[in-house]
Amino acid sequence: MVTLTIDGQKVEVPKGSTVLEAAHKANIRIPTLCFLKGINEIGACRMCVVEVKGARALQASCVLPVSEGMEVITNSPAVRESRKVTLELLLSDHNLECPTCVRNLNCELQKLAEELGIKSIRYPGEKHAPRYDDFSPSIVRDASKCILCRRCVSACHKVQGVGVISPNHRGFNTIIAPVFDLSLAEVACVNCGQCIMACPVGALKEKDDTDKVWQALADPDKHVIVQTAPAIRVSLGEEFGESRGAIVTKKLPAALRRLGFDRVFDTDFTADLTIMEEGNEFLERLQHGGKLPLITSCSPGWIKFCEHYYPEFLDNLSTCKSPQQMFGAVAKTYYAQKMGIDPSKIFVVSIMPCTAKKFEAQRPEMNSSGYQDVDVALTTRELSRMLKEAGIDVSKLPDEEFDDPLGISTGAGAIFGATGGVMEAALRTVYEVVTGKELQNIEFTSVRGVEGIKEATIDVDGTKVNVAVAHGLSNARKVLDRVKNGEANYHFIEIMCCPGGCVGGGGQPILSSEERWDTDYREVRGNAIYEVDRSMKLRKSHENPAVQTLYKEFLGKPLSEKSHHLLHTHYTK
Ligand code: HC0
Ligand code: SF4
């Protein structure tokens, strides 16, 4: 341990800690901007400078190691003035359209300007004109708001192992962009939105599709239906003052009805359907020498990653479409027939924690109903903006239920939203289908939690099934490399693109760097997802009565010809 003094207070921290960490431990707040714990600790912005007794210059505390007897001052006049100058220089070349910015009131730069008491900018100078990149189906970049903190660069390189954005050019002309200043749409970006989650300002945002939904809702000729992904029920409340991970399952139908949707359904229903198809696909491959390991295919960022970076695994992917897409296909066929509605008049909206779902909905494979199966995918943040615009406060709504029949689901569908959940849901069903016996303990805790890679061997009536779960694409890389190098013998792998699974998706409410340090949002929202599961009467996908009826009335059985036509696909790239 090392003992140092910060603002006259003695602090003891492990050797190798930084001064910023020591101050954090002592509840002494040092402002930061480029710092993102564990992801971007590079001392670039110099907002966290401190005075160290005996040192000639101010030091960036996020990269300054502690030493025995060190004396640190965090708020001297020199420190405060230095931070102000730094901030004013950043603001002098910033597109200050704050009231119309998507990050207004949730912007770390704005908050710092207020905290540091910036009243005017003393250094007016050359300013960059707005430079937009909005060709991607999912992500919009606006370089005129970028502060070059590199948090997005680290998220893309380190967390996702993708690395398609970097600093280009030098000095005043520096820009964070794909190579040769190409658009994100022209490089192997997987649309995950983790760069948005890392951005402290409004330089990165999702492609806003809310106008398309407003238009559909106002069109009397359209039957507008909506599905909400598993992870939305533990995140939307955060946008309305509820605690992180607050469960708002029953507020969702109330909110969406008040926005004007004709029917409010649940992606958890088709998550259950996915398990019926994917579980049977797994058994088919296991028992008949099919391609193994089977790898889950419901995370569109992961699919794109596989296509670009690991095409040799494309045949390992489950042929199941994601629950989002299965929903669209079922809505424009089975539901249309049942209700006697012309499918061309049905407009399907998804509320997803994910930016890649926008890309997935537009993929050419996703038209098996004869129409684009899902018309628009909105992120949690876009839904929150629509609700606010309509004056609907989620926290003040009564509890309501989802509509029948595509709104009936089980706990197994709900846990799709957390890393390990698809695997656990599949195991609950596979076990009972194979053995014909009731599973005694349905909670497969070995595949839960935020550890990057989880492995387990499950005994399914004498057959040992080796499974692995990875979330965050840099972890996916490790698992796939192990398989490639013959270091692991898995039968079934779950890969989710985003850290924590969908609860940590790139379309979710954004936490500041400071809040991310204090709260593991992946864990908090993930725990809430498992609480949702525990509260459900039915917790196994094959027990979903609406899914059983769907098979009886329409699909026949899992992996039937109709199922294959509507619910499965094959990726080739
Ligand atoms: Fe997910 Fe999904 S679990 S990918 O994270 O499988 O986005 O929440 O909706 O489709 O169900 C996202 C979440 C979904 C899908 C489901 C899957
Ligand atoms: Fe990288 Fe994902 Fe952002 Fe694309 S969306 S630039 S892959 S972090």
Image (cartoon, rainbow, N blue to C red):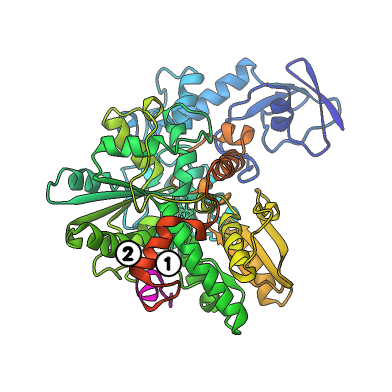
Residue 141 placement (x, y as % from top left)? 38, 49
**Location of mark 1 (residue):** 321
Give the residue at mark 2: 329
Residue in the image at 60% along x and 59% along y: 428
Residue 569 in the magenta stretch? The answer is yes
In the image, is 350 to the left or to the right of 28?
left
Q: Which residues are magenta?
A: 562-573
Disc 2 under 8 Å from ligand 1? The reply is: no
Looking at the picture, tell me which residue is in the foreground, 567 or 106.
Answer: 567
Among numbered discs 1 and 2, the one appearing first in the sequence: 1
Q: Is 496 above or below relative to 25?
A: below
Seen from the viewer's position, the closer of residues 310 and 448 is 448
Image quadrant where one finds the C terminus: bottom left
- Checking the image for residue 286, the label placed there is none
Observer-nearest of 235 and 402: 402
131 with respect to 487 (left or right) = left
In the depicted view, which residue is nearer to us: 231 or 192? 231
Write down the quadrant of residue 282 in the picture.
bottom right
Residue at the image position 59 percent from the left and 38 percent from the top: 524
Q: Which percent across, then down, holds residue 453?
A: 67, 58
Q: How far across and down, in percent of the image, does residue 522 sit?
A: 58, 43
Q: Label 1 vs label 2: CA separation? A: 10 Å
Judging from the image, what secondary structure is the residue with disc 1 in?
Answer: loop
Mark 1 surroundings: few (<14), some (14-19) or many (≥20) residues within 10 A: many
The amino acid type, in three-letter code, at marker 1 is: Lys
Residues at discs 1 and 2 in contact (Cβ within 8 Å): yes
Which type of secondary structure does the marked residue at label 2 adopt?
helix
**Which quadrant of the rendered structure holds the N terminus?**
top right
Report if residue 383 lies within the magenta region.
no
